[in-house]
């Protein structure tokens, strides 16, 4: 493997959730506001069923719909999409680097399939090009001895499936303040890409402001002992593969296993871990896809 590529990968592996710790990122990525799609095209001729959806069909965005009667399973680009057994409601999302289209495929009880292509609009990410070499060398062995167990806890938390139903809700802002770092921003060092910013940074201007749950969920990780990069890290599962991470908290108000309601205070803003000032770094993932929180909340007002 190319040495530079392996260094980038090592840095990314060490970065975990705290990619923002690699530098202060400027604001400027484009924002796509409001639901962009209302309905999809009809199913292939001759099939009575069709797949309709609405949402934000763009990189870092999401879609939701109701599966037609008789749907046995649904996949997006080969990834299983959970379907609510009572209502048929489903939810899926697109990674920051999603391809221009992904296949949505429903398998029906009668053995037929409905397949349609979902067009995913590209985003114009804020990119900074810097004529300096990327920081030399990967993380030290001493650092990784502390870091690896933290990464293991994060990965184990993400692997948990809970009965949370927050994925059905419209999200609210966990805290309000200046957006000091946008999702997806990235630096290139002499052409070599650094890790992109995996969440949104919100700086209310001081430590201690309450952080509320943006949607219903179940606490899947609460770092009472601060992690080396994320500090007091709180992770909440919203169900159906969707989860939130809240970094740099000064204090956590909930424990692993707690069910939280949208709007409930779960932590306080701080600067624990690697942070240059008090702010909340909020990141959202759907399965392995990193998604943009602002596309779940709409603009702050
Ligand atoms: Zn951040």
Image (tube, grey):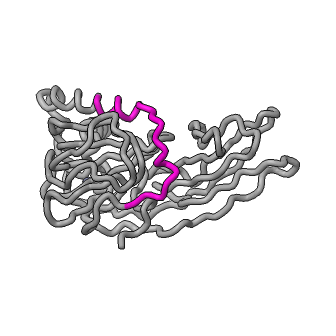
- Against 36, residue 119 (above or below) is above
Report the residue at 52% width, 54% height from top.
62
Q: Position of residue 157 (x, y in %)?
A: 35, 33
Report the residue at 40% width, 61% height from top.
294
| 161 in the magenta segment | yes
Q: How many marks?
A: 0
In the rendered image, the quadrant that contains the C terminus is bottom left
| 159 in the magenta segment | yes
Q: Nearer the viewer, residue 121 or 63?
A: 63
- Against 152, residue 134 (above or below) is below
Give the quarter of the image for residue 69.
top right
* Ligand 1 placement by image quarter: bottom left
- Against 144, residue 243 (above or below) is below
Residue 2 visible to the viewer: no
Residue 64 visible to the viewer: yes
Report the residue at 34% width, 34% height from top.
257
Residue range of the region highlighted in magenta in the rendering: 153-172
Report the residue at 42% width, 62% height from top.
297
Q: Position of residue 45 (x, y in %)?
A: 85, 51
Q: Position of residue 97 (x, y in %)?
A: 46, 51
Q: Position of residue 112 (x, y in %)?
A: 80, 37
Q: In the image as oriented, which residue stretches furthest toward the bottom? A: 301
Is 192 displayed left or right of 131 in the figure? right
In the rendered image, the quadrant that contains the N terminus is top left
């Amino acid at each position: 493997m190319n040495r530079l590529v392996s260094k980038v990968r090592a840095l990314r592996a060490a970065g975990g959730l705290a990619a923002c710790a690699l530098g202060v990122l400027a604001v400027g990525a484009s924002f796509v506001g409001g639901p962009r799609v209302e309905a999809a095209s009809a199913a292939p001729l001759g099939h009575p069923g069709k797949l309709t959806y609405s949402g934000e069909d763009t990189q870092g965005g999401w879609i939701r719909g109701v599966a037609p009667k008789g749907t046995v399973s649904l996949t997006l680009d080969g990834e299983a999409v959970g379907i609510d057994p009572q209502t048929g409601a489903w939810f899926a999302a697109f990674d920051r680097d999603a391809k221009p289209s992904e296949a949505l495929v429903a398998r029906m009880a009668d053995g037929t399939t409905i397949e349609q292509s979902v067009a995913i609009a590209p985003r114009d990410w804020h990119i900074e090009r810097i004529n300096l070499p990327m920081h030399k060398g990967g993380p030290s062995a001493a650092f990784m001895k502390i870091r690896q167990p933290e990464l293991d806890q994060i990965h184990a938390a993400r692997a948990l499936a809970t009965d949370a139903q927050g994925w059905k809700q419209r999200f609210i802002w966990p805290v309000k303040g200046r957006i000091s770092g946008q999702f997806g921003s990235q630096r290139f060092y002499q052409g070599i890409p650094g890790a992109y910013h995996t969440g949104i940074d919100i700086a209310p201007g001081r430590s201690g402001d309450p952080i509320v749950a943006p949607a219903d969920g179940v606490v899947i990780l609460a770092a009472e002992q601060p992690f080396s990069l994320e500090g007091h890290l709180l992770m909440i599962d919203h169900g159906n593969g969707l989860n939130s991470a809240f970094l740099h908290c000064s204090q956590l108000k909930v424990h692993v296993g707690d069910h939280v309601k949208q709007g409930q205070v779960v932590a306080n803003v701080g600067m624990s871990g690697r942070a240059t000032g008090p702010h909340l770094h909020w990141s959202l993932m759907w399965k392995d896809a990193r998604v943009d929180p602002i596309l779940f909340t709409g603009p702050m007002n």
